[in-house]
């Protein structure tokens, strides 16, 4: 007798990803980038969405340039785009990374003279070059621009990154001027400065390529993007138990919620291990259709308890969706919109 493999178990947690909203957000940011093209930052697994979901949708929308941070991320991204379309922001740390880039055709972002040397020694050709114009994080110091190692590079995109693009800061024009200076000093095919918020700073900041991340995925990093970005991501969880509390019963660790009257509550399969952090304790809101169901007490590792008073018809196995509009979620929890996305865990069916 042939044993059939069992059907896989069902998911009790899923991330609803609105691919149309993602595509629309890219097209909006591409249009706002004027004569420049918008690329996409897809590091950290496309800010938690999954590169295998986000990159094909972005490519369908017309996106042709992608940036990851790590080499292992680049390897995963290769399934969704040609190597020449993928830049690796951290650059080669050693000869092994440089050899991997040469073998695959991935584009390293060179961030220092040491990295330029590694790239030359590996026989590398086309690369990107990150100039530090004031964030003092990763990037070649302006003082090293005239070094022969830099002149020998075959630079596709000359990059820099803004520290305060989401603010009206004097750093913005200062970094712009330094980036323009670097563009005059180093031969390059294309130039890029703006992240999502940087796109709103005007044409001068656009160069040939912009690099939005957060706004593609539904984040609103600055006032200039309010009303133009669509929500993309919504966590959804199954009700795994329903119970009735009596007046005086408390809920969850440390009993931070106590019922004042009999009430029907539900346990959902979503917790802080999934990135639904304890910041949501006593504050989060789930939706069942239009009905709003409050989080009661502490969020646990794998579970959260919600008030079902407004939805008496819900049964075990039914689904609810978390309110996860990023600007509002950030205001409610004190977490950044970036953290709210990138902490979403690996247990979601995407
Ligand atoms: C993350 C990142 C971006 C995207 O920034 P957002 O603020 O998410 O738009 C662009 N460029 C670089 C170098 C980055 O590291």
Image: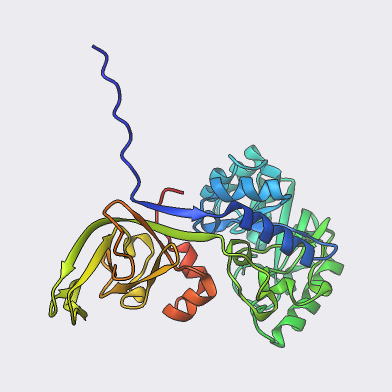
Vertical comparison of 304 with 280: above or below: above
- The image quadrant where one finds ligand 1 is bottom right
* Residue 130, position as x, y percentages in the image: 69, 64
Q: Residue at x 66, y 54 (%)?
A: 23
Q: Residue furthest front?
A: 313
Residue 38 in sight? yes
Left or right: 11 in relation to 59: left
Q: Residue at x 57, y 48 (%)?
A: 74
Left or right: 200 in relation to 10: right
Q: In terms of depth relative to the viewer, which is nearer, 279 or 104?
A: 279
Q: In terms of depth relative to the viewer, which is nearer, 338 or 145?
A: 338
Q: In terms of depth relative to the viewer, which is nearer, 164 or 156?
A: 164
Q: Which residue lies furthest to the top in this view?
A: 1
* Residue 279, position as x, y percentages in the image: 36, 76
Query: Quadrant of the rendered structure where residue 248 is?
Result: bottom left
* Residue 63, position as x, y percentages in the image: 71, 51
């Amino acid at each position: 007798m042939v044993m059939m493999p069992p059907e896989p178990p069902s998911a009790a947690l899923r991330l609803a990803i609105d691919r149309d909203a993602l595509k629309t957000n890219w097209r909006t940011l591409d249009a706002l980038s004027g004569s420049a093209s918008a690329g996409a930052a897809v590091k950290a697994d496309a800010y938690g969405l999954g590169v295998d979901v986000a990159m094909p949708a972005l490519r369908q929308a017309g996106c042709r340039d992608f940036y990851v941070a790590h080499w292992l991320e680049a390897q995963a991204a290769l399934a969704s785009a040609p190597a020449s379309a993928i830049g690796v922001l951290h650059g080669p740390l050693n000869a092994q990374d440089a050899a991997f880039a040469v073998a695959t055709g991935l584009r390293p972002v060179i961030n220092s003279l040491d990295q330029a040397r590694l790239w030359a020694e590996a026989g590398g050709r086309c690369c990107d070059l990150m100039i530090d114009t004031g964030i003092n994080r990763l990037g070649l110091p302006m003082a090293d621009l005239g070094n022969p190692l830099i002149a020998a590079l075959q630079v596709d995109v000359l990059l820099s990154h803004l520290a305060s693009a989401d603010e009206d800061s004097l750093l913005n024009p200062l970094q712009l001027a330094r980036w323009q200076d670097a563009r005059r000093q180093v031969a390059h095919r294309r130039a890029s400065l703006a992240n999502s918020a940087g796109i709103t700073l005007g044409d001068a900041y656009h160069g040939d390529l912009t690099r939005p991340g957060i706004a593609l995925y539904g984040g609103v990093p600055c006032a200039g993007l309010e009303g133009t970005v669509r929500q993309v991501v919504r966590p959804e969880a199954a009700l795994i138990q329903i119970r009735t509390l009596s007046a005086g019963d408390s809920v969850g660790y440390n009993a931070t919620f106590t019922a004042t009257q009999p009430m029907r509550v539900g346990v959902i399969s979503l917790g802080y291990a999934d990135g639904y952090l304890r910041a949501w304790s006593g504050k989060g809101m789930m939706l069942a259709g239009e009905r709003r169901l409050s989080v009661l007490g502490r969020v646990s590792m794998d579970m959260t308890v919600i008030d079902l008073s407004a939805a008496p018809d819900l049964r075990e196995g039914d689904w609810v969706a978390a309110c996860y509009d990023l600007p509002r979620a950030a205001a409610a929890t004190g977490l950044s919109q970036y953290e709210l996305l990138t902490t979403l865990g690996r247990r979601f069916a995407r």
